[in-house]
């Protein structure tokens, strides 16, 4: 069959600087990786679950366990021959989209390396380069924020996203507008820090001409987001709420999202992510590719996905050095015009360096068929 050996590995990468959101602050990234080998090639998948379940219910240790205990046995039993077989093989397991997505990506990478097809070509992506946006965490002060934003603009980033929360929203946004002007593509992300009762306060952001406000309210509340969308002019964009194409259809039909942040891990895989892209495009809803501080594995896969035509807004597809001094793979770099290149090699187009993998590995588990 397609898969001869399986490995689940947990690595830990230090962040270059603390990354603060309304969920809290991170200083390192624990990443669960899946490595499949077969037919003389290897396929890699990256699980985007964080160390603690503060973004969504999944967390890295739990993802490694659900992979070993339930997902891999089903994958092996189904003897999958292509990425299209993975979701059906795992359908009996409820939830755990990020763990499932890691497995699907590893099968997809393996399959495409064997067929010598790039991920972008597989997706039917036309572009060879895409504009990169960058996500800016909550800073200790407004002057510190302006320095961080200035640095990213000097690097060439095409869009700035500011993390906000109650007490850190209107003032930092106003300061960035005053310092960098009204033409700067600028958006905010609340990670569900507000409530519908904050609508009047959130309306104060309308004067700043933001591209969007991302996930202002509770991840489970499409209805309140639809109500909020009637009370503010800044377009509402959803992230955490969009856990599947089904959820995207509900959000679009309810008017809860005028824009959607697509994260393949959050929705269960790159194939589901493409379905959401197609659905949104059919409804005239813009999408962009979100980020989960991925290593070069998930980072490159995201860039290939973001080359699809419906990704009309810059995503959080920044260079590896936005978060990491050393990436597990060859680093993704930012071109001088603030774009990143769509990978052209077979599959994801890069693999972890064995020495770096060993250096950052916390533990690894393997399974021979
Ligand atoms: C809670 S921090 C991780 C999720 C966050 N991601 C980012 O802000 C982008 C991070 C990146 O550039 O990878 C989001 O809610 O969009
Ligand atoms: Mg977000």
Image (tube, grey):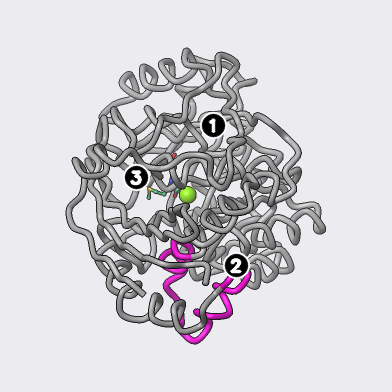
Residue 312 placement (x, y as % from top left): 71, 39
Mark whose residue sits in front, 1 or 2: 2
Boundaries of the magenta span: 81-103
- As helix, strand or loop, the secondary structure at mark 2 comes to loop
| Disc with the residue nearer the chain's start (1 vs 2) | 2
As measured in the structure, the alpha-carbon distance from the residue carrying label 2 to the one carrying label 3 is 37 Å
- As helix, strand or loop, the secondary structure at mark 1 comes to strand
Q: Which mark is residue 133?
A: 1
Q: Which mark is residue 21?
A: 3
User: Dividing the picture into quarters, in which one does residue 283 lie?
Assistant: bottom right
Residue under the image location 45 percent in, 65 percent down? 103
Please give left or right for residue 80 compared with residue 183 in the image: left
Q: Is mark 3 within 8 Å of ligand 1?
A: yes
Residue 307 placement (x, y as % from top left): 67, 40
Badge 2 local density, few (<14 within 10 Å), some, or many (20+)? some
Badge 3 local density, few (<14 within 10 Å), some, or many (20+)? many
Residue 196 located within the stretch drawn in magenta? no
Viewport quadrant of the C terminus: bottom left
Residue 350 placement (x, y as % from top left): 47, 39
What residue sits right under mark 2 in the picture?
82
Residue under the image location 41 percent in, 54 percent down? 46
């Amino acid at each position: 069959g397609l898969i001869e050996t399986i490995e689940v590995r947990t690595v830990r990468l230090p962040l270059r600087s603390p990354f603060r959101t309304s969920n809290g602050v991170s200083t390192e990234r624990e990443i669960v990786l899946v490595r499949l080998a077969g037919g003389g090639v290897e396929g890699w998948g990256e699980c985007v679950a964080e160390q603690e379940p503060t973004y969504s219910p999944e967390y890295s240790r739990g993802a490694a366990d659900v992979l070993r205990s339930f997902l891999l046995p089903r994958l092996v039993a189904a003897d999958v021959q292509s990425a299209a077989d993975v979701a059906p093989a795992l359908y009996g397991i409820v939830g755990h989209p990020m763990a499932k997505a890691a497995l699907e990506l590893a099968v997809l990478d393996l399959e495409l390396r064997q067929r010598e097809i790039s991920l972008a070509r597989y997706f039917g992506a036309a572009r060879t380069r895409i504009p990169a946006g960058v996500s800016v965490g909550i800073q200790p002060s407004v002057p510190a924020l302006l320095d961080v934003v200035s640095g990213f603009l000097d690097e060439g980033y095409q869009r700035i996203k500011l993390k906000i929360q109650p007490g850190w929203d209107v003032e930092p946004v106003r300061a960035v507008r005053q310092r960098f002007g009204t033409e700067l593509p600028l958006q905010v992300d609340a990670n569900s820090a507000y409530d519908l009762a904050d609508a009047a306060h959130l309306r104060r952001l309308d004067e700043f001409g933001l591209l969007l406000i991302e996930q202002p309210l509770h991840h489970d509340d499409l209805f309140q987001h639809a109500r909020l969308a009637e009370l503010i002019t800044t377009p509402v964009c959803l992230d955490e709420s969009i856990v599947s194409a089904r959820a995207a259809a509900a959000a679009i039909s309810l008017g809860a999202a005028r824009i959607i942040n697509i994260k393949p891990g959050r929705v269960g895989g790159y194939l589901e992510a493409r379905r959401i892209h197609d659905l949104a495009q059919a409804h005239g809803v813009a999408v962009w590719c979100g980020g989960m501080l991925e290593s070069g594995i998930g980072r490159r896969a995201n860039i290939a996905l973001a080359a699809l035509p419906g990704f009309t807004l810059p995503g959080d597809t920044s260079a590896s050095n936005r978060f990491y001094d050393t990436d597990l793979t060859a680093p993704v770099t930012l071109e001088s015009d603030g774009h990143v290149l769509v990978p052209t090699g077979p599959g994801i187009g890069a693999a972890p360096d064995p020495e770096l993998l060993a250096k950052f590995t916390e533990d690894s588990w393997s399974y021979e068929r």
